[in-house]
Image (cartoon, helix red, strand yellow):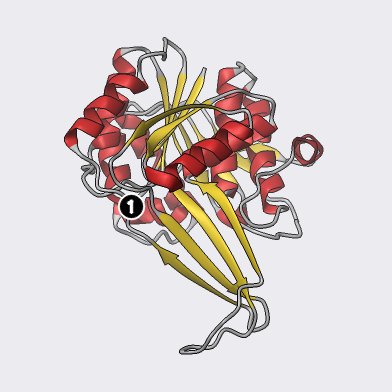
Amino acid sequence: MIKTLTLNPALDKTIIVESFRLDQLNRIKKVHKDAGGKGINVSKMLMQLGQQSTAAGFLGGAAGDYIKSEVEKLGIKTNFFETAEETRTNTKMVDSISNTFTDLNESGAQITESNIEELTEGLFADLKRDDILVLAGSIPAGVENDIYFKLIKAAKQRGVKTILDADGPLFREGIKAAPTLIKPNELELGLHFKEKFKDLKTMIRKAESLLETGIEMIMLSLGKEGAVFITAADKYKIEPLKLNVKSTVGAGDAMVAGLAYGMENNLGLEEILKTAAACSSATLLRDGTKMGSREDVERLKKEIQISKL
């Protein structure tokens, strides 16, 4: 079983206008709404792969009801916990004439201690040994930076595998609990070590030092340069594909989904890496917040090149 956790989901609302003008009436041409959040994106990509998962997190109000409904329409199971305050709405205004993109993001609902207690208890109610818990994204007000640390520790006590995809203080605190797998990018790793890496070798060496904390696997995302997968035994370089990129939104989440899928289905290491890279690449081919299609994943897997370092 795979369960994804999104503590700070959002109703993503995209508004299309033409030639936006300040202090004047502007008419909206089109509105698109979608259920947003890193963990939710992981569950969406898993569904594209034919893998069932459960999406968990905090939801509240009409926006929360909409997100839950949209996720369930996709056939994804849900394990959301209700908050008194409304789930945030993030609005992106796109001016198709001026080619501008303006983001207006709400801060999110205030989470209470009782909310956290309810989630902590309910989150593990159906998780068993060797199940996978994906912890991804930011946190709302009222949640401390050590939340992922506490949840990873609780998961380890139950024999549940964990994947952490977070940055800043959440990453710093979370890795202290030694999750099974982490997926930092170059910027996130640099912020953690408070340095700008001069070359790939230095970056890999720094990432390898995190294995000493008990972390088993590291997927180091390098953007246009591909990725590097690191374990105590081996290191692999995943070469990037030349693609007609339409959107980078969700590509990292898709990679996490590919990793979780491979772990859940006991695939060989090379197959896991090709699946993860293909999921990310397939998502780059899609517009907006859409995740990659299974057809594109299977096609791109054949093109992924992996080499030992």
Local crowd size for mark 1, using a 10 Å CA cut-off: few (<14), some (14–19), many (≥20): many
Which residue in the rendered view is the most extreme toward the left?
113
Task: Note whether residue 186 is visible.
Answer: yes
Which residue in the rendered view is the most extreme toward the top?
129
Q: Where does the image place residue 208, in percent across and percent down from the top left?
A: 40, 38
**Please, is residue 116 above or below residue 98 in the view?**
above
Q: Helix or strand or loop: what does disc 1 sit on?
A: loop
Task: Note whether residue 42 is visible.
Answer: no
> What's the residue type where badge 1 is placed?
Gly
Query: Of 146 and 35, which appears nearest the observer?
Result: 35
- Residue 76: image quadrant is top right
Query: Of 32 and 96, which appears nearest the observer?
Result: 32
Q: Residue at x 74, y 40 (%)?
A: 293
Q: Where does the image place residue 261, in percent across and percent down from the top left?
A: 60, 26
**Please, is residue 27 above or below residue 10 in the view?**
below
**Please, is residue 288 above or below residue 297 in the view?**
below
| Residue that mark 1 sits on | 108
Figure quadrant of the C terminus: top right
Q: Residue at x 17, y 35 (%)?
A: 113
Q: Where does the image place residue 252, in percent across and percent down from the top left?
A: 55, 46
In the visual, does 268 lie left or right of 22?
right
- Residue 84: image quadrant is top left
Q: How many numbered marks, from 0 up?
A: 1
Q: Where does the image place residue 11, in percent across and percent down from the top left?
A: 48, 51
Q: Residue at x 42, y 10 (%)?
A: 128
Q: Residue at x 61, y 52 (%)?
A: 289
